[in-house]
Image (cartoon, rainbow, N blue to C red):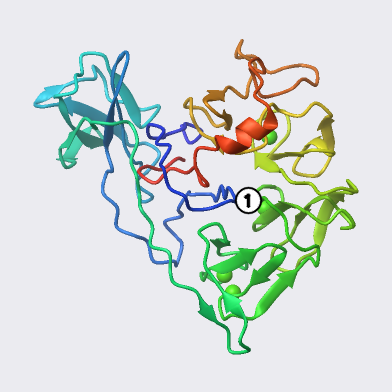
Amino acid sequence: MNKRFRYTALLCLGVMLCGMVTPMDSQVSAASTRQMEKLSRGAVAVKVPEGVLVSWRLLGTEADSVSFNLYRGTSKVNDTPITSRTNYLDKAGTTSSSYTVRAVVNGTEQAASPVVKVWSSNNLDVPIQQPAGGKTPDNVSYAYQANDASIGDLDGDDKDEIVYGSLVVDDNGAKLANTGMGHGDALHVGDLDPDRSGYEVFKVNEDKNATYGAAMYDPRNGNILWGVNTGKDTGRGMSADIDPRTKGNEQWAPGIGLRSAKGALVTNALPSSINFGIWWDGDLLVNCWIIPRQAKVKSTSGTIPTRPLPICLPRQEPAPITERKVHLPCRLICSVTGARK
Ligand SMILES: [Ca+2]
Ligand SMILES: [Ca+2]
Ligand SMILES: [Ca+2]
Ligand SMILES: [Ca+2]
């Protein structure tokens, strides 16, 4: 059951936060020494054509063996405890329904979560506060943008480092690493290669003279793990686990094809989107987000392709790339109301 996928309803939040998708691993180890935020069950109920989809968090402190009961008012919705996911489609739900979730541990139902009502809209705006700019000590002007940086504990010392372009800044403000390859329009930080300890960064580079138009590197020291020379401004790049045939994330960008976490060429056929990924359909593979729709990553038949094929499906209704740029939904897609495991 530890392979089960638990997720909340997709919430494409209108947060203009970040130009870099940062699929950090949200799994929390109970043994971690990092301070854990005390989170509620985080239930969310949204109206869908088939009823009401209710989703909730699996807490980082909960065992894989936990199951759940879902209540609409005082009526239990599910026949047997929900064991395979943290969401449930209540076909009898309406916009006036309200829900609670109860964990079941060793056959005993736990306390009910706070009551939640069905959202009046299936999206949630999260406004941000942009700090004012200023001058550095050496009198250089600066301003903040919400897409400036990604963060994570990259060196394992339980403090967060900052990834800013090719630079990695240690938690004390000192340089931790720098690939020296300058600016890029997209980077991804996470455990992209589970065979290597720690996190990896996959980044595309704008400088056509950069050694690599796209490269994966170790953020602890800037060492390039693999890269592809494209000889051009490589303005788009994605990293997500979209193909179960190769372990860990796949990486793709114009001019590099689809690459495994080790940099091996999987196929030259690029997925139909190089913008965003999202866990959408309840399994462990990431789906590509294409405006105004999301496309399944896997074969629509549910079987694993036996030969290299474009992985993101469907590819019909292609939008001109300029249109896709204009219609990017937001700068960051993430689960802020739930958790996956
Ligand atoms: Ca750290
Ligand atoms: Ca550090
Ligand atoms: Ca790794
Ligand atoms: Ca994979």
Q: Quadrant of residue 271?
A: top right
In the picture, measured across the screen, residue 214 lies left or right of residue 26, that is: right
Where residue 199 appears, as percent x and y from the top left, is: 65, 56
Left or right of 62 in this view: 130: right
Q: Is the CB of mark 1 within 8 Å of ligand 3?
A: yes
Q: Amino acid at mark 1?
A: Asp
Residue 80: give x, y in percent of width and height: 26, 20
In depth, the one of 243 and 111 nearer the eye is 243
User: 237 left or right of 84?
Assistant: right
Name the residue furthest top.
Answer: 301
Residue found at x 66% / y 31%: 273
> Within the image, what quadrant is residue 42 found in?
top left
Placement of 115 over or under 70, stated as above or below: below
How many discs appear?
1
Vertical position of residue 67 compared to residue 304: above or below: below
**Residue named by callout 1:** 191
**Residue 68: x percent and y percent?**
27, 31
Whether residue 194 sits left or right of residue 134 in the image: it is: right
